[in-house]
Amino acid sequence: MEARTLGLVMLSIAWWSLFYALELFSDDLESMRLLNKISYPGIVSVSVFYFLFSMALVDKRDWFDWKKIVMLFIVPIAVLFAVWTNEQHWLFYSVSELDQTSAFPLQKLVHGPLFWVAMSYNYLLLLSGIAAVFRKYLRSTGLYKGQLRTVLLGTVFPILVNINYLFDFVDIGYLDLTPFAFTFAGVFAAAGVFRYRLFDIRPVARETVIERLPDGIVILDDGGRIVDLNPMACKMLGIDASDAIGNSVQEVFSDIESLASFFTSGSERRELNARERVIEIKQSPIYSNKGKIRGHIALLTDITERKEVEDALRQSEERLALAVKGGKIGLWDLKMKKGEFSINDRYYQIMGYPAGGSVITFQQWKELVHPEDLLPCLEEMDNCYEGQTDYFDIEYRMLSKGGEWIWVHDRGEAAERDEDGRATRILGTHIDISPTKQIEEALRESQMMYKKLATTDMLTGVMNRYSLTELLKLETERSRRYSAPLSLIMFDLDNLKTVNDNFGHLAGDDALKVTCSFVQSNIRSCDDIGRWGGDEFLIVATNTDLEGAVKMAEKLRSGLSSIDKKEYGPLTISIGVTTLLENESDFDGLLRRADEALYESKRSGKNRVTSVI
């Protein structure tokens, strides 16, 4: 009974450890969650089987009644259901997310109330089993006392490791070492078995450990004959155990000469190709009590996938080197303590220098950076150096050998850090982006030109009708919201047709330009002028009532009439003035009244100001 329960304990630990190890090798949250759920049958079984193992150890056989065993598994089964449905209620783990702060991705788990219920049950069984064994230990003497002491010592360690994981006395992040600590406890139990002959569990150990190892095991006697091997070794080597055991390695591996020669050479380690797989073999001698070699044991590990990854990595590095060369990318290596700034040939070429040098100082690099860009660059680099960021991405100007400023893009990443987290080495790339910057500048200028075309009257340089309409919408809304006065001045150039007929359209265009230039230079900076159409213009006077707008219009009229152009004579304008009424929600009425006032000024003899409300 002891052998069976210990075998079940080891099986549960192996199940737990295997799937937790697979979880550690995963890098996405969904896989981690799935593997965590798959590992839970092992997790919830460890405490139950350990309790039964303890009961068998202290000879309390009444616990092996099937009804009691079912009762012991009620809570674990409920725990399994809670874990497998956690995403529906989040009562077992209140948080399950990916933690990237460690050397490799881990699943960050925050324990919910059901977890602590399950943990309380597990510790109840574990501590009950330990207490029973401890009481037996106190009453025992001689060899059996040593046997029980070995079991107790092996059990204490994983409990301490688990308590540290639960309450974080020693910070190891979100890494759970409990399954591996239980494996250590299994080693202790095995030591007690083989040293003290506690009970005969060798058949169970072979079934649960040797037979199910993910690595192959081959045992040879001193004559080079195969004494034993496990199923994984048979699978790796493509042989049958019944045909191999009792025969020499030369006979069994006659078609794999490299493998036969390895077993007979006495070598300790080698990588071999066998059955289209790459296998790493480690061989160790087996000594008798008198120190004589009785045989050898070989551990076979299938490293095919690892080799494929290594080959892929090497090919990736070769492709990267080719891309760097073909993509004309400069590389740099900054060693912080020495202040050395190593750069490759392409970096020199970007700066206009001949290739050949290998190291410049960091101070020399700073002297080449544009003064306006240096401080922002150093701030980004300092954040990476201090560990606030893992990398930096900067664009700046550097002085080339020809004396021209060129735009470059640098990306750097900390390759090495000291114990305080400060970078001791930063690696990066250096790319000439001057052509891109030139395109961006041309695009920006083009956008500005198009914007000007869309919003400006190209003859006079003042706002066009579209811009005036948008401005009137904005100012009307602002006037209503803040109860601020808003007035509108509409004017046109008197006798423009006469100027065109007598002096030509170029003279007429010049008259319009002179008029707009005069008006624009004699209104406030907060007022705006625009061409409404033909020879009609609007002045939007913000925060100005009707009286103020009339004064402004009169000043403009009299000032312009004093200008005498020799080409076509003096210029005069007719003006209409109005203001926005309190009950007006739009500017339609404002425009209509201004147009009526302007019409009245022209009908009354021109060169005058008329206001209406």
Image (tube, rainbow, N blue to C red):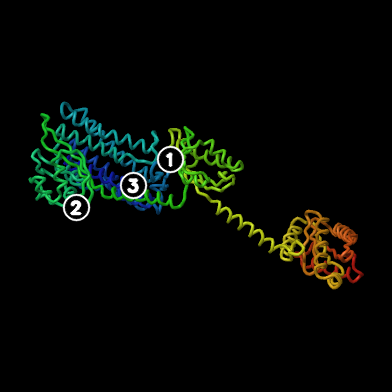
Foreground tag (3 vs 2) = 2
Residue behind mark 3: 25
Q: Please tell me which of labels 1 and 2 falls first in the chain.
A: 2
Q: Quadrant of residue 603?
A: bottom right
Image location of residue 299, percent across then percent down: 19, 42
Q: Amino acid at mark 2?
A: Arg
Quadrant position of the N terminus in the picture: top left
Q: In this rendering, is residue 306 above or below 164?
A: below
Q: Please tell me which of labels 1 and 3 falls first in the chain.
A: 3
* Residue 501 falls left or right of residue 371: right
SS at mark 2?
loop
* C-alpha span from label 1 to label 2: 40 Å
Viewer-nearest residue: 434 or 267: 434
Q: Amino acid at mark 1?
A: Ala
Viewer-nearest residue: 219 or 493: 493
Foreground tag (1 vs 3) = 1
Residue behind mark 2: 275
Residue behind mark 1: 415
* Residue 212 falls left or right of residue 591: left
In percent of the image, x 15 and y 28: which residue is there? 143
